[in-house]
Amino acid sequence: MGVNVLIFTDCSARGFIRYSGAYTIASVLRDNGYTVQVIDYFLLAGPEKVNAVIDKFVGNETLMVGFSTTFMNLFSDYIEESRINNSMFKFGNNVGVGYGASSVPGFSLGVPISDSEMNELRERIKKLNPKSQLVMGGAKAEFHKQSQIDAFVLGYADKSIIEYLKYLEGKNPFFQYTDLGNNQISIDKDINADGYDFINAETRYHESDMIRPGELLPIEISRGCIFKCKFCAYRMIGRKKNDYTKTIENLYAEIMYNYEHFGTTKYSFTDDTYNESVQKITDLAEMFNRLPFKIEYVAYLRHDLIQRYPEMADILKESGLKTAVFGIETLNYESGKIIGKGLPPEKTREMLQWLRDDKKWKNDIITHSGFIIGLPKESRDSVNKWMEELLDFKYPLDTFAINALNLRPTAARLSKSEFEMNYKDYGYYFDSSKSKSWINEYWKFEDTLSLAESAQSYADHIGRTKLRAWQPMTMRNYGYDWEYINHVSSSAYNKDIFYKTIEWADDYYRKILSQ
């Protein structure tokens, strides 16, 4: 018989934390009467295990086999990452852990499988059910162009995937899509899932998801962002405060369900800006206090909102925040104002120092931020100045990630940043032979890549950076205590987590194939 829908997804490249997208869609599908099996660790499985999964779950009732791209790197990006991190990689199945894996622990664990392997998967699926469609969705679906895929689902799929399945069943003859030719379509007419009752929705994980006891889970509290940073190409930016935020009671029910069924007390909040308002985090903190356990979580935060509303600091700490992921981006005031981060650098430092004070976060919450090289008004001298400040062990930020400004104005995608749409207005020009090789009065794109690489490597080498961004909560997910996490380096993380992830993947597939 088979399930109606089989979805392959993958974990984060730097350790296993589930991505919510595939599970949210699975929950929506089950609510609409479809049977679904989500398969995680796709790129660590290897052909033998994936073939066994296909044989087990694809049958005459299977309408589609989906592939979520969110944590599946594009091949070109994978090569670029290996160069940036100065690492040597092996590709293919000879590595012994899956479709593609790093020979150096800690960096991307997988790459999209080869055309020949994808052809084999398609042939196997079609042999079991010629009518079953191969569908690709997730955050990077618009960049993948595999010829083996029948349909690409773009944007939020909460509504469109149901309409598409009805279309496949012959129940929705007026379904709207874009014909790409070569028997491929793009499902792109409702990328924001307009009309979907998000605020009252619950993602329910299923026993077939093989959630580990006490496993950290992602939770989608709200969608979109109230800000509109000029380098940001995410959808649903610039929305009003507290729009697209789930109701407190629905979130309580979702969290309690996870606790009662899986023992989950740790979370990854997927909000683009969790602390968008005092009211939001206060309401959630009050709800968390009703739980029969103490919640721990990691979240994206705006540092300037804490500076504006200092009461946020205590609310966040008392509600269970363990890792704060800021987006400071630059310590150059002129550049910050242009991109939408207008807090003066001295105020940023003052606020971060205040958080580190004994009366506030001290060492109980790890603080992290991203930084970008190549912003407007950012000269080599100004970068060197703020980078010297950032590399100082006395700077009140536990850890950071330095990246080059990435612009792709010619890329065929649904949403683009202000910089990409009007790049000439901000002083950027492009090498016609390279789609994202920009130039401005101070930089070439390649030079920002090189500097970001060397600066990050140096920071890691001297021990300036602790665990970054989601890494601390990943360590918690793997059973490490906070005393260890607060002192461990990124290099130790890479070593420990890589092999643990392989063990978890093997155990996961044993359970999936024996259920």
Image: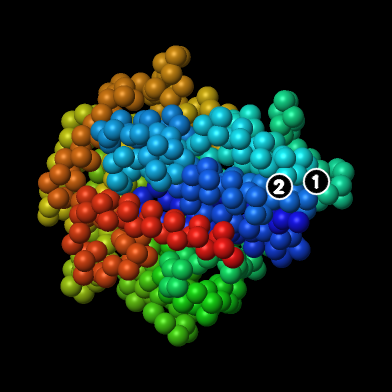
Q: Residue at x 59, y 46 (%)?
A: 51
Q: Nearer the viewer, residue 505 or 439?
A: 505
Seen from the viewer's position, the closer of residues 514 and 494 is: 514
Q: Amino acid at mark 2?
A: Met
Left or right position of 60 against 491: right
The mark nearer the N terminus, 2 or 1, is 2
**Residue behind mark 1:** 168
Asked which secondary structure carries label 1, the reply is: helix
**Residue drawn at point x = 50 percent, y = 57 percent:** 509
Quadrant of the snapshot with the C terminus: bottom right
Task: Tell me if 444 is positioned left or right of 461 in this view.
Answer: right
Q: Are marks 2 and 1 in contact (CB under 8 Å)?
A: yes
Q: Residue at x 21, y 29 (%)?
A: 380
* Label of residue 246 in the image: none
From the viewer's perspective, is residue 268 above or below residue 492? below
Check disc 1 and give the amino acid type.
Leu
On the image, the x and y values in percent for residue 88 come to 29, 33
- 80 in relation to 245, above or below: above
Q: Quadrant of residue 423?
A: top left
- x, y percentage for residue 263? 46, 77
Q: What quarter of the picture does the N terminus occupy? A: bottom right
Q: Position of residue 69 (x, y in %)?
A: 54, 43
The residue at the point 61 percent across, 32 percent down is: 119
- Residue 285 figure quarter: bottom left
Give the vertical position of 399 relative to 514 (above or below).
above
- Residue under label 2: 64
Mark 2 Cα within 10 Å, few/some/many (few <14, many 20+)?
A: many
| Residue 263 in view (yes/no) | yes
SS of the residue under disc 2: strand
